[in-house]
Image (cartoon, rainbow, N blue to C red):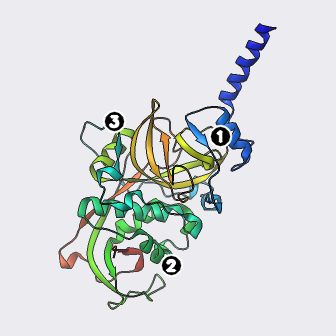
């Protein structure tokens, strides 16, 4: 009898390890309890702040809708000694956009927070320019960012491609702008141009290159395939347990480290501070936790000071508002 019980427990343990929770509904007590019973590298919990902070309807339903990186270039970094732990918030404490958490419950998709946020981070790190991400997003959403009503596409690639073609202006807001929609030019009395930057897009294929890019230039944008268990992430190092695919979310990777012997990347989500570790999360390195999505991307920005090389006209999709 004792041998039978040991064998039963052994089989049960193996089946628990292999269980993927695909039949359990997302954001339910059942899936939370099942994850926590496994005692894995992360904990599940209720992510609520009045109402659910998770916007499942903002996830892109198929990866065929994503803009891959065929128009970007692979960036080559020299071999360098990487830190065991790195957090861009600590490396550049004056660049507060790095650690700012946004909330998609306002109705804005993840790609715009990720894309604008990554450019804001890198403008601050490389050029000392402080961008008001929230104000910039507000204006860009109204003007549709040149994406032809494709706002909920979770497509950072499309946004970065647009800026690579058109460049970006940093501007000061003089008064509430009325130069909408996207096709109209802003008037000089509504904004004050500050500087113009040319944008070049790059992508990174390997883990060490991701880390090198963040170390030298700041956070990078990434697509993440989302499965039903991720919605209930609360703490620890996320490792996917579910096979129930829900769609794609855009995130920003800002660092890495090791927790309880598990190597992780540190990332920023846009589901508000009630989700995860106050809006942040860790996911396991080296295990394809981003899923079969396009590789991480990042923009390089260089100021253009030659007058004839600066566009004579501009639209809201190019305007990044300075902090006041």
Front residue of 316 and 218: 218
Residue at 49% x, 58% y is 67
User: Quarter of the image holding residue 41?
Assistant: top right
Image mark for residue 84 = 3
Which residue is depicted at the point 45% across and 84% down? 183
In the picture of the structure, the residue carrying the numbered disc 2 is: 142
> Does residue 136 sit above or below 103 in this rendering?
below
Q: Is residue 284 visible?
A: yes
Q: Residue at x 25, y 36 (%)?
A: 81
Cβ–Cβ under 8 Å for marks 3 and 1: no
Give the number of the mark in front: 3 or 1: 3
33 and 229: which is toward the camera: 33
Calculate the distance from the C-alpha at mark 3 to the C-alpha at mark 2. 42 Å
Near mark 1 (Cα within 10 A), the count class, few <14, some 14-19 or many ≥20, is many
- Where residue 233 appears, as percent x and y from the top left, is 59, 46
Label 2 SS: helix
Identify the residue position indicated by label 1 in the image: 242
N-term-proximal mark, 3 vs 1: 3
Q: Position of residue 49 (x, y in %)?
A: 62, 60
């Amino acid at each position: 009898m004792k041998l039978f019980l040991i064998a039963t427990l052994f089989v049960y343990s193996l089946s628990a390890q292999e269980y993927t929770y695909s039949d359990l509904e997302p954001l339910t007590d059942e899936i939370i309890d099942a994850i926590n019973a496994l005692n894995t590298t992360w904990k599940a919990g209720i992510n609520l702040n009045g109402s659910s902070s998770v916007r499942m309807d903002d996830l892109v339903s198929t990866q065929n809708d994503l803009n891959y990186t065929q128009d970007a270039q692979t960036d080559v970094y020299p071999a360098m000694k990487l830190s065991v732990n790195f957090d861009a918030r600590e490396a550049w404490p004056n660049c507060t956009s790095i650690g700012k958490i946004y909330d998609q419950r306002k109705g804005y998709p993840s790609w715009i927070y990720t894309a604008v946020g990554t450019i804001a981070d890198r403008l601050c790190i490389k050029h000392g320019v402080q961008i008001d991400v929230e104000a910039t997003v507000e204006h860009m959403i109204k003007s549709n960012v040149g994406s032809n009503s494709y706002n909920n596409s979770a497509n950072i690639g499309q946004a970065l491609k647009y800026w690579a073609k058109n460049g970006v202006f940093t501007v000061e807001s003089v008064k509430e702008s009325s130069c909408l929609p996207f096709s109209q030019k802003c008037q000089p009395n509504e904004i004050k141009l500050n500087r113009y930057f040319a944008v070049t897009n790059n992508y990174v294929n390997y883990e060490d290159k991701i880390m090198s890019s963040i170390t030298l230039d700041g956070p990078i944008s990434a697509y993440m395939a989302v499965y039903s268990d991720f919605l209930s992430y609360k703490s620890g190092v996320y490792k996917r347990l579910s096979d129930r695919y829900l769609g794609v979310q855009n995130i920003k990777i800002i660092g890495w480290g090791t927790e309880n012997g598990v190597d992780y990347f540190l990332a920023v989500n846009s589901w508000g501070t009630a989700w995860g570790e106050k809006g942040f999360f860790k996911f396991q390195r080296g295990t394809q936790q981003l899923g079969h999505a396009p590789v991480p991307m990042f923009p390089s920005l260089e100021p253009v000071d030659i007058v004839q090389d600066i566009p004579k006209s501009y639209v809201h999709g190019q305007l990044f508002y300075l902090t006041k």
